[in-house]
Image: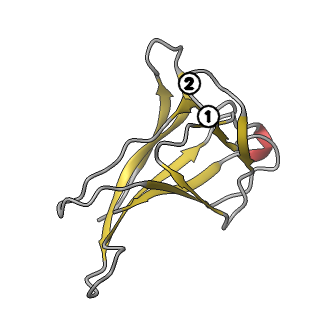
Amino acid sequence: MLGWATWGRRRSRGQPSTRCASYGTLGEAGWNTRRSRLSRLALSLGRYAEVGGGLPPHADLTRTGPDGRTSLCTFILYLSDCEVGGETVLLEALPQPSAVRAAVTPRRGRLLLFPHLCPHLARPVVAEGLPKLLLRGEML
């Protein structure tokens, strides 16, 4: 299945709109090997093309596959470098940005894996980091 990505503004629960990438589903690739724990992989493509694109603090939702398995972790594979800005920041708690657990700078080929329930945000992208490209997914 082919995928897509759209770009624009996202509004978050009463917050002013934020420039960010919207995700289009690329599809699911399945492995039918016997006794495999990794049976499905759900992917989406993200593109931050404007200065200031980012995401407010949030936690990811779980996804349930057709076989009843529920995802527990999010992964982000960075497809481009951001010299300045665009970091994914893992936080201690929500709703307000709290103590930072880690700030991960986007580097092409870098893979970040974290639990869905881990609060995080995407810092705004600056001109030197455009476009910020990433592949986001969950393992079911």
* Label 1 to label 2: alpha-carbon separation: 7 Å
- Looking at the rendered structure, the kind of residue marked 1 is Gly
Type of residue at label 2?
A: Thr
Please tell me the numbered disc located at residue 54: 1
Closer to us: 111 or 108 = 111
Is 3 in front, or is 34? 34
Q: Residue visible at 70% across and 45% down?
A: 130
Contact between labelled residues 2 and 1, with CB atoms less than 8 Å apart: yes
Quarter the N terminus occupies: bottom left
Give the farthest residue toward the bottom: 34
Residue at image location 71% in from the left, 42% down from the top: 101
Q: Is residue 23 left or right of residue 95?
A: left
| 24 shown above or below 125 | below
Residue 131 % position (x, y): 66, 47
**What's the residue at 25%, 83% (across, down)?**
32
Colour scheme in the image?
secondary structure
Spot occupied by residue 120 in the image (x, y as percentages of width and height):
59, 38
Query: Quarter-wise, where is residue 33 in the image?
Result: bottom left
SS label for mark 1: loop
* Circle on res. 18: 2
